[in-house]
Image: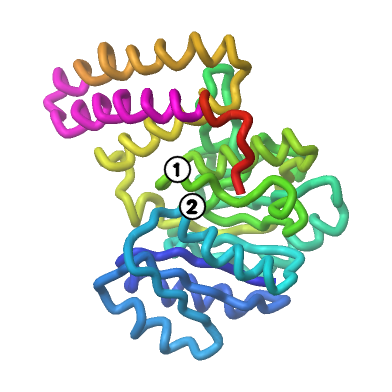
Amino acid sequence: MHAIVVTWNGAHLLPDCLNALEHQVPRPHVVVVDNGSIDRTAEVVAGFPQVELLNLDANLGYGRANNQAMRRALDQGVEFVALVNNDVEVESGWLSGLLKAAREHPECGLFTGTLLFRDEERVNSTGLVIDRFGRARDRDFGVERSKLATEDGPVGGVSGGASLLRASMLRTVGLFDPAYFAYYEDVDLSLRAAEAGFHCWYVRDAVARHRFGATVGAGSPRQRYLLGRGHLRTLAMHQPVLKAAALVPLTVAYRAVFKAPVELIRARPSLALAELKAAGAGALDAVRAFIGRSRPRR
């Protein structure tokens, strides 16, 4: 099986991530996909002789970069593909725990574990939940680990930060939608898988640790923009048509008329601009999504 790590100017994050993957049992074939970095990424990866480096000429974004490596893995006949962010360190037993669940639940195509904040005993995610407005959030976000009550079982979606994907699911529903640059592509894939009969499964004891927001920046204008844009595309693509036709313009108006002015009042003009940009770009993406709903995404 292959474990794929997408990175962009993340040389400082890679050693911990790669060391953790090399100590997994069974040991995966690790592929680092470099999204056109200008830092020491190639030098760092060279220090891990068993790790393959796939260089891209430019920053294609999270989904498209993963797709490059997933296609190669599928061509080689793998049964599973693990996706691990460069700012994530998987703990001992992470991979074996997910593989065990995959053997026990052949009806499931996507698997996720307990993602903790690095250096904290608090939960970042136990999978994704999607509310009636089509918004995705990390389940159990911020819960103290000692108080986590969620047990193994089905979940609405998996986080792309650390997950295991069944190859047969990918061959059936396709890879990440390249229209997403970052954020919500994992939501979209989880929903497409569910529509094709592949469910998502959570494994409590498969633990990984996340340097939250290390790449884009937690709460940054860039993150706010990408989240807002991705949400609107996903709304248009997956909600029932009439519901989506109502929710998309309401969500665009909410961001432009309410959230942007609120950020201005809070003296955060960069976030206000991010909300306006997300509303505009997301509206265009939503229109494209409506048009493309019947087209397969491979």
Q: Residue at x 58, y 10 (%)?
A: 242
Rendered residue at 65%/35% (across/down): 191
The quarter of the image holding the N terminus is bottom right
Residue 158 lies, in percent from the top left, at 62, 45
> How would you rate the neighbour count of disc 2 (Cα within 10 Å): few for under 14, some for 14-19, many for 20 or more?
many
Q: Residue at x 51, y 78 (%)?
A: 19
Which image quarter: residue 40?
bottom left
| N-terminal-most mark, 2 or 1 | 2
Q: Is residue 269 magenta?
A: yes
In the rendered image, residue 162, in percent from the top left (x then y), is placed at: 57, 56
CA separation in Å, label 2 and label 1:
7 Å
Q: Is residue 146 left or right of residue 185?
A: right
Residue stretch in magenta: 263-289
Which of the two residues, 110 or 218, is positioned nearer the viewer here?
110
Q: What amino acid is labelled 2 in the image?
A: Gly
Amino acid type for the residue under numbered disc 1 = Tyr
Residue closer to the observer: 156 or 234: 234
In the picture, measured across the screen, residue 163 lies left or right of residue 14, that is: right
Res 76 quadrant in image:
bottom right
On screen, 72 above or below 259? below
Label of residue 180 in the image: 1
SS at circle 1: loop
Q: Which mark is residue 63?
A: 2
* Image: 20 above or below 291: below
User: Which secondary structure type mostly characterizes the magenta part of the structure?
Assistant: helix
Decide which of 267, 29 is in the foreground and name it.
29
113 vs 51: above or below: above
* Circle 2: element type: helix
Circles 2 and 1: CB atoms closer than 8 Å: yes
- Would you identify the image quadrant in which residue 258 lies? top left
Residue at 63% over, 17% down: 240
